[in-house]
Amino acid sequence: MLKRIVIILGCVFLLFISWSSVLGMDTTTPLERQIALINAADVEIERGTHINAVPMLMQALSYETEFTVSVLERLKSIHLFFGHIHEFERILNMQIARDDVSAGNFDELARHHMQQGRLADALSVLRQGVARTGDEALKYFYEQERYAFTTSRVAFEDVTAFFNSGLQVKNDGLWGLANMQGRIVIPNMYTQISTFDTADGGSIVAMRPDGAVVTVNLSNYPTAVFEADFDIVQIGNLSQDTIPLKTGNGNWILANSRLFTTGEEFEEVSVVSNSAIAIKTSDGWGVMRLNGETIVPFEYDEIIMDEVGQFYIHSTVFARRGDRVYLYREGVPITETFEDARPFADTGWAAVKRDGAWGFVNVTGEIQIGFHFEDALSFGQHLAPVRVGDYWGYISIYGAIAIEPQFYEARRFYHGSAPVLTEHGWQIITLVERLD
């Protein structure tokens, strides 16, 4: 009986509003009109005739009051009840577009996207939510999900590391070049292959099975052939249009991508790293700029390099003498020394070893993450490879595990991708959301 009275009163009130509007006599406020529509819609919902409530609630949305949020919640519930996914999403998007949006609205939309298999959309929503609300729970949710990745189907016998968006890859005993997605750009037909260099239109230097050293472009067309009275037995990596070549007598020479060389010989020499080069003399290893300026004196046992030979990043160099590693910054050594180290990458902190464990330092040698890891590589794009037990995973800049240890080996991230060693061989994982 009471329900019937409520329905009758609601209908009478709505009828009154309609006639008052027609006669120009409407004296009700927007709030009163919205409440009447909400009450009438609630009656329909209670009766189980949800669909009849939708037009009432849509009309109620035309009034902006303190109850508008509750109107959106009712509409959202109805569409979810009927499985109207697109309408449900539309209401959720209306909620997060409002000035009074709550962290819970962002959380709900993100989880909805994840249930629909749209992780990238979910991460975008969470990122917006963190920016607009600063909510700690949303930040935690985002940090937990932002490191999701996909794995390439292709696998390789061996790889180096990404450099200039290319990756040296080995299959069937021969080397080629792959792109960021793992697609072969230069076929696996060389016994040795350099990194890809963008200088002079873009090229690599490679050694054929017959021992010939050639420069080829990205179409694998030869553009130069090394011609001299001596043999080349090993090639280095091409960087800034310069490549080290080891001759048959054990010494090294430098050539450009056109394979012209001055013939000057070195006991040992590195690739060019940000306009610097490491050279071994009778006094030891040192580093100099290409203009001849000394950065690290020639007195060290080793200049520490990464997988492709880079060593001079952010004006820093790690140099080993005996059982100690020194960090040089802008040509000046810092006081702290380490047992071992990895060169800095283009972004982030460097991995260093102390008392048998690995941690991370910034370019001035200040500890950023403590010495907790069995092995580690330097950070690339907010992530650093670390070894925990028998497996490698990745930590975030907060020092927490971001990608669970599950790989036999791992390399740094570069433009959102990283080579990892799995049971299938070396594969490429790519972050769903790229971190820069």
Image (tube, helix red, strand yellow):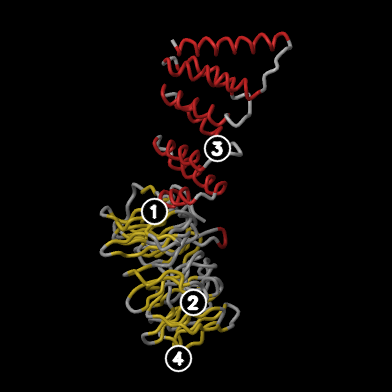
Q: Do the CB atoms of the residues marked 1 and 2 lie less than 8 Å apart?
A: no
Q: What secondary structure is marked by label 4?
A: loop
Decide which of tag 1 and tag 2 comes sooner along the chain. 1
Q: Which residue is mark 4?
A: 283
Going by the numbered disc 4, the residue's amino acid type is Asp
Q: What secondary structure is marked by label 3?
A: helix
For the residues labelled 3 and 4, the Cα–Cα distance comes to: 66 Å
Q: What secondary structure is marked by label 2?
A: loop
Q: Which mark is residue 237?
A: none
Residue with the most extreme right position:
24
Q: Which residue is mark 3?
A: 96
Residue with the most extreme front position:
2
Residue with the most extreme bottom position:
283
Decide which of tag 1 and tag 3 comes sooner along the chain. 3
Q: Which residue is mark 1?
A: 187
Q: Residues within 10 Å of mark 4 (few under 14, many from 20)?
A: few
Q: Which mark is residue 365?
A: 2
